């Protein structure tokens, strides 16, 4: 199985039709649905309609993400709510045929890392079983979004306890946070479950533009080298993140130009 191309968009049922049509017209085979609190306005009927729309356009779901929910929160009500959301979201992801479920570890202020990892291992175990039974992999956000996975060392310690979890890898996020994003990939590419493609132009360490892939400072050839060396066979999911490249004609240009650049590193 080879890498595929997708992008974030269409999660709002009102936009699924137009976004799936755009994906088809631009030669993308996958969409990614990521939700914050907006997930809580989604119901089973809307997901059923989304599935029908995706099938009509021949578009799959690469990943289904739930951002910012905290399954190890100190507050019991918040913790229970997070588990309820993860359970419900896993069902929706399975219904849509997603390959990867992307979640946050959650966090517990004031606790040492080892304790947070143990709380996470206990809390996530039933969800991992459910995700596995649904034919998906579980990948976890790095660096932000209700997580204690704030550096590579935290991942390494977590893998010692919960070895099956994967990383949702976004090289631009690692670079912006001051980490060696290529070293992360070189050493642990076999643990990458999902990849975000987010270009960036840096001026004085600030991101001033996020244009199509190949038009900024990210060395996609080097990144793709290590993905190939580790036989990554998942989706390269474009993340349109900054205007004028995220909506309308700018988004279409982003998709077309990014695809043209990335495909030179992909096997047909």
Image (tube, helix red, strand yellow):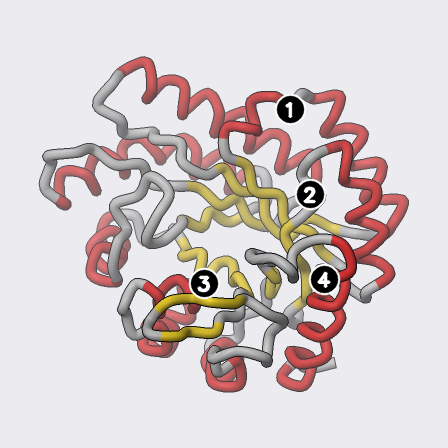
Q: Earlier in the sequence, mark 2 or mark 3?
A: 2
Which marked residue is nearer to the observer: mark 4 or mark 1? Answer: 4
Q: Which residue is mark 2?
A: 97
Q: Residue furthest right?
A: 56
Marks 2 and 1, how far apart at CA: 17 Å
Q: Earlier in the sequence, mark 2 or mark 4?
A: 2
Marks 4 and 1, how far apart at CA: 28 Å
Marks 2 and 3, how far apart at CA: 23 Å
- For residue 250, which numbered disc appears in the image? 4
Q: Could you tell me which secondary element the residue under label 3 belongs to? A: loop
Marks 2 and 4, how far apart at CA: 29 Å
Identify the residue shown where x is 49% and y is 37%: 66
Residue 53 lies left or right of residue 159; in this view the side is right
Q: Could you tell me which secondary element the residue under label 4 belongs to? A: helix
Q: Determine whether 171 is above or below 79 in the image.
A: below
Which marked residue is nearer to the observer: mark 2 or mark 1? Answer: 1
Q: Determine whether 117 is above or below 88 in the image.
A: below
Q: Earlier in the sequence, mark 2 or mark 1?
A: 1
Q: Determine whether 75 is above or below 216 in the image.
A: above
Q: Are marks 4 and 1 in contact (CB under 8 Å)?
A: no
Marks 3 and 4, how far apart at CA: 22 Å
Q: Which residue is mark 3?
A: 170
Q: Earlier in the sequence, mark 3 or mark 4?
A: 3
In this view, the residue in front, 40 or 252, is 252
Q: Quadrant of residue 116?
A: top left
Q: Could you tell me which secondary element the residue under label 1 belongs to? A: loop
Residue 229 visible at all: no
Identify the residue shown where x is 21% and y is 42%: 117
Q: Give the x, y percent position of residue 154.
A: 22, 55
Residue 101 lies left or right of residue 9; in this view the side is left
In this view, the residue in front, 21 or 140, is 21
Q: Determine whether 207 is above or below 80 in the image.
A: below
């Amino acid at each position: 199985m080879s890498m595929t191309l997708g992008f974030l968009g269409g999660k709002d049922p009102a936009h699924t039709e137009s976004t799936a049509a755009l994906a088809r017209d631009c030669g993308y085979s996958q969409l990614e649905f990521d939700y914050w609190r907006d997930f809580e306005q989604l119901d089973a009927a809307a997901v059923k309609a989304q599935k029908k729309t995706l099938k009509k356009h021949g578009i799959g779901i690469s990943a289904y993400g739930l951002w910012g929910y905290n399954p190890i929160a100190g507050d019991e009500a918040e913790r229970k709510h997070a588990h309820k959301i993860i359970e419900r979201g896993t069902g929706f992801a399975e219904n849509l045929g997603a390959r990867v479920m992307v979640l946050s570890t959650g966090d517990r202020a004031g606790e040492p890392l080892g304790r947070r990892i143990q709380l996470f291992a206990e809390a996530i175990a039933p969800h991992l079983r459910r995700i596995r039974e649904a034919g998906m992999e579980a990948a976890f956000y790095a660096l932000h979004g209700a997580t204690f996975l704030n550096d590579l060392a935290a991942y390494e310690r977590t893998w010692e306890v919960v070895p099956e979890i994967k990383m949702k890898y976004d090289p631009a996020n690692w670079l912006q946070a001051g980490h060696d994003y290529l070293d992360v990939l070189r050493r642990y590419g076999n643990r990458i479950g999902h990849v975000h493609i987010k270009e960036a132009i840096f001026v004085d360490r600030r991101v001033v533009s996020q244009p199509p892939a190949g038009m900024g400072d990210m060395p996609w050839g080097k990144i793709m080298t290590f993905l190939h060396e580790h036989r990554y066979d998942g989706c390269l999911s474009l993340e349109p993140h900054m205007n004028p490249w995220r909506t309308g004609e700018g988004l279409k240009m982003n998709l077309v130009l990014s695809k043209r650049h990335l495909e030179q590193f992909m096997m047909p």
